[in-house]
């Protein structure tokens, strides 16, 4: 079985040394009282809960999966999942980042995110049940009526009820403008919803007494396309005004998908047969409302992949120190043993360092983004809120796509460190690879994230959001540009900053002539911008680590070594990606469709 030790020291480094969350939170009235002691306590207890309760269920959940009883339409989750969920609810974990007025603990998103990294490292499939619940909470919190909030939010906060997001239909996933589910007014303020949804995560299960489905559907006469989509709350059991459960709503699980990974999470086909629903966020405004949930979920997917990257790395590192094969090329390192541990081999170290750099960079990026969300939601100054909102908008597709692509590489490299044993189920390494793969697909595929970044977030506002990030980079370069010790980090950071500016302008010009140019460039472009963001965060890491180089604390020496590895071994990929992004659309379109 895989092991896991929550990376609390590195989390603390990012939170307190890199982001200085204590000072930032003091400036946010809602979080001014959140002390370092409280955050540390939450993280320590969270580490205990996730490693003791969830980690032992990860392989069992993968092997057993969820089971649907077709006569009752009820789903049984793998053994142990329900008891773990009860502990989660009793421990108040579901309420961590929910508002106190609904029974929540009101902690910052950045703390909740750190907790979700640990949850996902220990058990991604299980963690999707509370993960989607929190997304539904945020959507209702932002768009629900006072009455809806009063009825649903306390139950989602406590975790007594869970949530889902029901967008996808058999004929439409990316292109939600084509969705067909219908909502007819019933004349009493509610709607009758009919249609079929597929691939609904946590769509049916036995963990909680009720499931709050957030469903996209069309009203009669709604405009075609995405402008005619509305959002509805469709509870599995219709609650009475006091929150007790009323009648069963006809939204039934027709089948569970058999899939590559995350077996412990029920991916449900849901049939709505005149199910009763209530409108959220106004007629035909469903997609805007759902975007709150989708954005939260996109960051959540980044956290899933970060957790998997970390746990896969940790297990590979332990194995590499232990496994004896061959001798070091530069002479035996463990002559008393029949062979050297494989960690002496440079390429094994390359694989380990790749995974570790992706974990450390991913942690810095996701925590940075989460703190910007806290500012966006709570800062008293409107201009700061707006800047933070722009930063979140820019970084969200990068968190989703860059970190999930990296995790696919990292989990695969970590598996490779195990040789053939990695491919065998016993060690748990191949499960990490399988679980990591979905993260590149759902919540909008990584291609869609790239189009969102380049098209909507950058070109559509003439690069204004990107410039705000660029200002962080140029300020850093200006401030530290004369520091010789930092030049190995500053020079390549400044270089990629300039290249991104040039590349963006070039693609923008080409896209004006032929919009397909944007589609041809978007995927490598996102990865280049991902590297710009990582280079900035690793340069900041290096600055902090260098300042502590006399401290005799290995932690800082190791941070510096990983930052150097990132700049020398991973960042150079951006040169190739820039060439790809610049190469244009012609070769992609040269082959006629029938020739494929
Ligand atoms: C395990 C699992 C869990 C899921 N959970 C949920 C859930 O909880 N709720 C929910 O509503 N959905 C869920 N989904 C659905 C998921 O979000 C969709 O599968 C995903 O958004 C892609 O949609 P699709 O499968 O219809 O693929 P399609 O939209 O058919 O896309 C097929 C391919 O075409 C590409 N493509 C499409 N349009 C473009 C374009 N304009 N430019 C370039 N490439 C394009 C896509 O990137 C993709 O590679 C889940 C799916 C799975 C497998």
Image: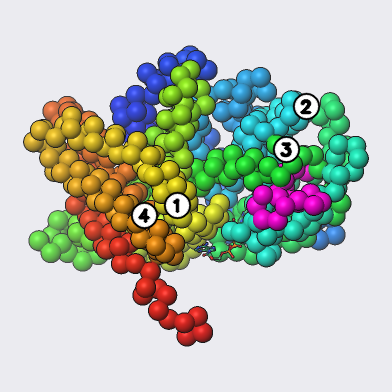
Q: Which residue is mark 2?
A: 147
Q: Which residue is mark 4?
A: 508
Residue 364 point in image, percent of width and height: 35, 38
Q: Residue furthest bottom?
A: 595
Residue 9 point in image, percent of width and height: 34, 32
Q: CA distance from mark 1 to mark 4?
A: 9 Å
Lower position in the chain sequence, tag 1 or tag 3:
3
Foreground: disc 1 or disc 4? 4
- Name which residue lies at 86% across and 44% down: 185
Residue 265 point in image, percent of width and height: 63, 52
Q: CA distance from mark 4 to mark 2?
A: 46 Å
- Judge whether residue 465 can be spotted in this image: yes
Q: CA distance from mark 1 to mark 3?
A: 27 Å
Query: Number of callouts in the render?
Result: 4
Give the residues drawn in magenta, as a range.
Answer: 214-235
Residue 423 lies, with reference to residue 592, above or below; the image says above
At label 4, counting other C-alpha atoms closer than 10 Å, the crowd grade (few under 14, some 14-19, many 20 or more) is many
- Judge whether residue 365 can be spotted in this image: no
Lower position in the chain sequence, tag 1 or tag 4:
1
At label 1, counting other C-alpha atoms closer than 10 Å, the crowd grade (few under 14, some 14-19, many 20 or more) is many
Task: Please say whether residue 150 is one of the residues in the magenta stretch.
Answer: no
Q: Which residue is mark 1?
A: 455
Residue 498 point in image, percent of width and height: 23, 47
Q: Secondary structure at mark 3?
A: loop
């Amino acid at each position: 079985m895989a092991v896991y030790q929550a990376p609390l020291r590195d989390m603390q480094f990012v939170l307190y040394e890199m982001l200085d969350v204590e000072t930032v939170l003091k400036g946010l009235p809602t979080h001014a009282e959140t002390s370092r002691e409280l955050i540390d306590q939450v993280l320590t207890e969270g580490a205990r809960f996730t490693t003791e309760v969830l980690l032992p269920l990860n392989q069992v959940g993968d092997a057993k999966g969820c089971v649907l009883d077709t006569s009752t339409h009820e789903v049984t989750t793998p053994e142990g999942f329900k008891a773990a969920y009860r502990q989660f609810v009793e421990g108040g974990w579901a309420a961590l980042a929910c508002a106190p007025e609904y029974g929540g603990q009101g902690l910052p998103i950045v703390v909740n995110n750190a907790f979700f990294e640990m949850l996902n490292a220990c058990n991604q499939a299980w963690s999707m049940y509370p993960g989607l619940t929190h997304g539904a909470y945020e959507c209702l919190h932002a768009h629900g009526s006072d009455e809806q909030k009063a009825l649903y939010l306390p139950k989602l906060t406590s975790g007594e009820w869970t949530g889902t997001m029901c967008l996808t239909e058999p004929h439409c996933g990316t292109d939600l403008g084509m969705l067909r589910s219908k909502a007819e007014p019933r004349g009493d303020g509610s709607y009758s919803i009919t249609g079929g949804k597929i691939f609904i995560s946590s769509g049916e299960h036995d963990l909680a007494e009720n499931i709050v489905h957030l469903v996209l559907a069309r009203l009669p006469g709604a405009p075609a396309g995405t402008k005619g989509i509305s959002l509805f709350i469709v509870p599995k059991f219709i609650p009475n005004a006091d929150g007790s459960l009323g009648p069963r709503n006809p939204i039934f699980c027709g089948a569970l998908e058999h899939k590559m990974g995350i077996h412990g999470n029920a991916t449900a086909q849901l049939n709505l047969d005149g199910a009763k629903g209530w409108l959220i966020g106004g007629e035909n405004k469903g997609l805007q409302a759902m975007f709150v949930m989708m954005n939260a979920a996109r960051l959540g997917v980044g956290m899933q992949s970060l957790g998997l990257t970390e746990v896969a790395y940790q297990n590979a590192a332990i194995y590499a120190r232990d496994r004896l094969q061959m001798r070091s090329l530069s002479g035996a390192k463990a002559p008393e043993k029949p062979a050297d541990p494989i960690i002496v081999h440079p390429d094994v170290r390359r694989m380990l360092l790749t995974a570790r750099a992706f974990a450390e960079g991913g942690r810095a990026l996701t925590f940075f983004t989460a703190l910007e969300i806290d500012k966006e939601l709570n800062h008293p100054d409107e201009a700061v809120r707006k800047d933070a909102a722009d930063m979140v908008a820019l970084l969200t597709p990068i968190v989703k796509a860059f970190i999930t692509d990296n995790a696919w590489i990292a989990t695969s490299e970590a598996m490779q460190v195990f040789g053939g044993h990695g491919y065998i189920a016993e060690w748990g390494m191949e499960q990490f690879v399988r679980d990591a793969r979905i993260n590149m697909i759902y919540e909008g595929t990584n291609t869609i994230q790239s189009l969102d970044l380049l098209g909507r977030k950058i070109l559509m506002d003439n690069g204004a959001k990107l410039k705000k990030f660029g200002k962080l980079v140029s300020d850093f370069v200006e401030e530290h540009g004369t520091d010789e010790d930092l030049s190995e980090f500053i020079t390549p950071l400044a270089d990629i900053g300039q290249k991104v500016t040039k590349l963006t302008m070039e693609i923008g010009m080409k896209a004006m002539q032929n919009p397909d140019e944007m589609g041809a460039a978007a995927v490598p472009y996102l990865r280049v911008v991902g590297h710009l963001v990582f280079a900035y965060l690793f340069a900041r890491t290096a600055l902090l680590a260098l300042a502590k180089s006399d401290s005799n604390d290995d932690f800082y020496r190791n941070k510096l070594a990983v930052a150097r590895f990132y700049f020398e071994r991973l960042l150079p990929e951006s040169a190739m990606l820039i060439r790809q992004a610049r190469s244009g659309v012609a070769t992609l379109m040269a082959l006629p469709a029938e020739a494929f």
